[in-house]
Amino acid sequence: MSDTEPAIIVKDLYKTFKLPHDRHSGIKQLIVNFWKRKKGYEIQNVLNGVSFEIEKGDFFGIVGRNGSGKSTLLKTLAGIYAPDSGQAVVNGSLIPFIELGVGFNPELTGRENVFMNGALLGFGRAEMAAIYDDIVEFAELERFMDQKLKNYSSGMQVRLAFSIAIRADADILLLDEVLAVGDEAFQRKCYSYFAQLKKAKKTVILVTHSMDSVQRFCTKAMLIKDGNVEYVGDTARIASMYREENMDKDEVAKLLEKGTSANKKVTVDARLLNKPSDSELLFDIAVTSKGDMPDAVMAVSLTKDSGEIVYRWASNEKLSEDILIKGDKKIVVKLNIQNIFPNGVFSLNISLRNKDMTTFYFSADEILKFRVVNRSSYSADAYWKPNERVEISQ
């Protein structure tokens, strides 16, 4: 493949499918439908003039909601579907990771399926014998290779298929949701493999619902909606657009609800006062105690859904005076934090203790959960030190 020509050129691609309404009960029904000019199907427009280019060495993400046309687009690029009109030009050899395990025979052993699947990918028997041990080790199936495939779990079959498929040497790889294969440990192997592909500047097309994967691996991405290209370009913007599209009205309403946590002595109410797509996150935290806490230290933190702490505020570090909490009196902490956080789900965590840390009055993780939709292009791997403003009323 030339260094100057794009790896893939897609121009004005259209694809439709016929969706049958119901089954005909017989010849009589066919005749009745004919005379009524009633069709037994409807036309579904899946791709509506899709156009884009992928340069050699791009790690290109394709995202969109279910039914948007992503998988149909990949299968058209792989030659599985023929377009109704338009062009999909592939400059180089291409391996699709679309339906892993296609061609497996459940009546054959894992070992026999390795050699058979390798032959489908163009490997000779001697070549497969040379890489057999690596395939089995990667799939973590050493003890099961002489068992029939029908006795494998679905996860084991996908791991084996994936381990075979990645041995194929091609100019372009099509990956459809393969990041979801296997358990957590095997997924880490997949992530490592994709990092190697990116480092080697392989041309990769990744269809996924994981915006973390898009921002982690992809150099460019495309959002597709109802068979139309909405945007091609920056991955952070794509992730933001996708998450905002998937936030329905009910979810937004839940983001604005308050969270409450209590023990025998302390009750804490927390609210997010604005939308988590705004430039600031405005928190209202109300504390009511049944007893005096004259030397209370309040700590507030934000964590990602992975558990990583991205922000922390503690009153003894940020305030010149102690927080005085008296029995049956409410104090309210208004915390305004600059929204520089990556897109994703976050939790608000709150704790109260005395100054010398000998007594914990209160502790609550995930008192409030919300989803940040940030339209700015921030790196998902950065450490965050946002600007903040705090007001306390006692």
Image (tube, rainbow, N blue to C red):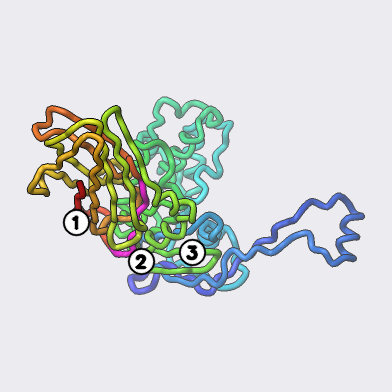
Front residue (pair 193, 5): 193
Q: Is residue 304 magenta?
A: no
SS of the residue under disc 3: strand
Disc 1: which residue: 388
Front residue (pair 322, 114): 322
Among the two numbered marks 3 and 1 on one chain, the one whose residue lies closer to the N terminus: 3
Q: Which of the two marks, 3 or 1, is nearer to us in this view?
A: 1
Residue at the (47%, 44%) spot, across then down: 118
Q: Callout 2 environment at 10 Å: few (<14), some (14 to 19), or many (20+)? A: many
Among the two numbered marks 3 and 2 on one chain, the one whose residue lies closer to the N terminus: 2
In the depicted structure, whether residue 363 falls above or below residue 9: above
Look at the image and give the residue range highlighted in magenta: 369-377
Residue at the (42%, 71%) spot, across then down: 53
122 relative to 32 in the view: left or right: left
Front residue (pair 361, 5): 361
Residue 56: which numbered mark, if any? Answer: 2
Disc 3: which residue: 224
Residue at the (46%, 60%) spot, across then down: 245
Q: Amino acid type of disc 3? A: Ile
Task: Tell whether label 1 touches label 3 (CB within 8 Å).
Answer: no
